[in-house]
Image (tube, rainbow, N blue to C red):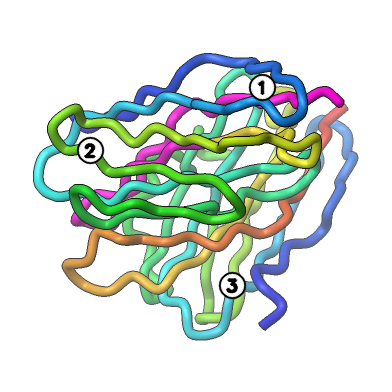
Amino acid sequence: GDSVTQMEGPVTLSEEAFLTINCTYTATGYPSLFWYVQYPGEGLQLLLKATKADDKGSNKGFEATYRKETTSFHLEKGSVQVSDSAVYFCVLSLNTGKLIFGQGTTLQVKP
Amino acid sequence: DAGVIQSPRHEVTEMGQEVTLRCKPISGHNSLFWYRQTMMRGLELLIYFNNNVPIDDSGMPEDRFSAKMPNASFSTLKIQPSEPRDSAVYFCASSLLAGGSGANVLTFGAGSRLTVL
């Protein structure tokens, strides 16, 4: 069935380090892919999205490319900041509108 | 737009009491979702509405939970009677879901943190 698998956390990095959070998916049809971020004490908010293969979503220095051949949508940032500490969710949006959330990856950035 | 508005932000109640959580979606959105988040189970979809009609309530834990959407600008999630295992953060989210489109972008509220003693 349709599913999303993202790397387990927590991920702990020093400020200015390079970030990769892996996400792979299984889906039929042509889904859209999202990354949502949840800062402490807040709701989830859309970070970036890609709606078709080879699309690159980007926002706030974060990027992710929709790779159909490897069924992946890995999140990357070249230089993380303490303020990026949050939980990151990879999300699959099926053609029906149904959303499938990954389990979330906690990122902690230390000064 | 002020975004998705949820109330109360925090609720502490005793086992057996009725709890009502409220949500005002973004104006113009046609879909509304209720999620529950806990450390143990992560984020769970409880129910979602499209054009005020419940479409999928398979995630509602049991008969103690009920949700209504009497109009496009208001929804409630009720737990009666409440139990300690219902303690969680409950999120409401809304979206504009176009027919046949896969890009269902949700806007979440800030959540209602429920503690049942």
Element under label 3?
loop
**Image marks 2 and 1: residues in contact by CB distance under 8 Å:** no
Residue B82, visible in the rendered structure? no
Residue drawn at x 75%, y 21% as measured from the top left: A14
The magenta stretch spans which residues?
Answer: A89-111
Q: Nearer the viewer, residue B62 or B33?
A: B33
Residue B92 to residue B87: above or below? below
Answer yes or no: are tags 3 and 2 on the same subunit.
no
Please tell me how crowded label 3 is: few (under 14), some (14-19), or many (20+) other residues with Cα within 10 Å.
many
Residue picked out by circle 1? B39
Residue A17 visible in the displayed image: yes
Left or right of residue B51: residue A46:
right
Q: Are marks 3 and 1 in contact (CB under 8 Å)?
A: no
x and y percentages locating residue B82 in the rendered image? 73, 36
Q: Earlier in the sequence, mark 3 or mark 1?
A: 3
Residue A93 has which mark? none
Q: Is residue B105 magenta?
A: no
Taking the image as shown, residue B47 lies to the left or right of residue A93, namely: right
Give the chain letter at badge 3: B
Seen in the picture, residue B1 relative to B75 is either above or below; the reply is below
The label nearer to you, 3 versus 2, is 2
Per the image, the residue denoted by label 3 is B25
Q: Tell me which chain the residue with mark 1 is part of.
A: B
Q: Nearer the viewer, residue B6 or B69?
A: B6
Q: What residue appears at the point 54 percent right and 45 percent down from the top-left corner? A: A62
**Is residue A108 found left or right of B11 in the rendered image?**
left
Three-letter code for the amino acid on which mark 1 is drawn: Met
Q: Amino acid at mark 2?
A: Arg
